[in-house]
Amino acid sequence: MNPRHRMVLEADNGMELLFVCPHDGCGRRLMLKRSGGLTVIDRGDFFALHYGGTEGLEISSGIGG
Ligand SMILES: [Zn+2]
């Protein structure tokens, strides 16, 4: 079973949200646009299932993989 990592919101400039994975040895980072779309900045642990979110926005596992 793949590990599950909960990503946390690190920055929000009103248009884009920066999520990071605080898990040791992972460090996945991605930018989520409120208008839709997602950019993976750092892939992190490829095998982990990433999830997380904030009000009105959600990241589901595996998205942007
Ligand atoms: Zn992770």
Image (cartoon, rainbow, N blue to C red):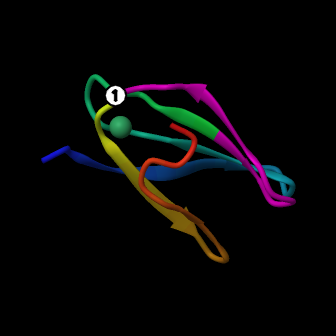
| Label 1 sits on residue | 45
For numbered disc 1, what is the local secondary structure? loop
Q: Position of residue 38 (x, y in %)?
A: 71, 44
**Left or right: where 32 falls relative to 53:** right
Q: Position of residue 47 (x, y in %)?
A: 29, 33
Q: How crowded is mark 1: few (under 14 residues within 10 Å), some or many (20 or more)?
A: some
**Left or right: where 33 falls relative to 22:** right
Residue drawn at x 53%, y 49% as measured from the top left: 63
Q: Which residue lies furthest to the left in this view?
A: 1
Q: Quadrant of ligand 1?
A: top left
Q: Does the residue labelled 1 lie within 8 Å of ligand 1?
A: yes
Residue drawn at x 12%, y 47% as measured from the top left: 1
**Left or right: where 2 falls relative to 47:** left
Q: Position of residue 65 (x, y in %)?
A: 50, 37
Please, what is the three-letter code of the amino acid marked with disc 1? Asp
Residue stretch in magenta:
31-46
Q: In which quarter of the image is residue 58?
A: bottom right
Residue drawn at x 42%, y 55% as measured from the top left: 61
Is 39 located above or below residue 45 in the figure? below
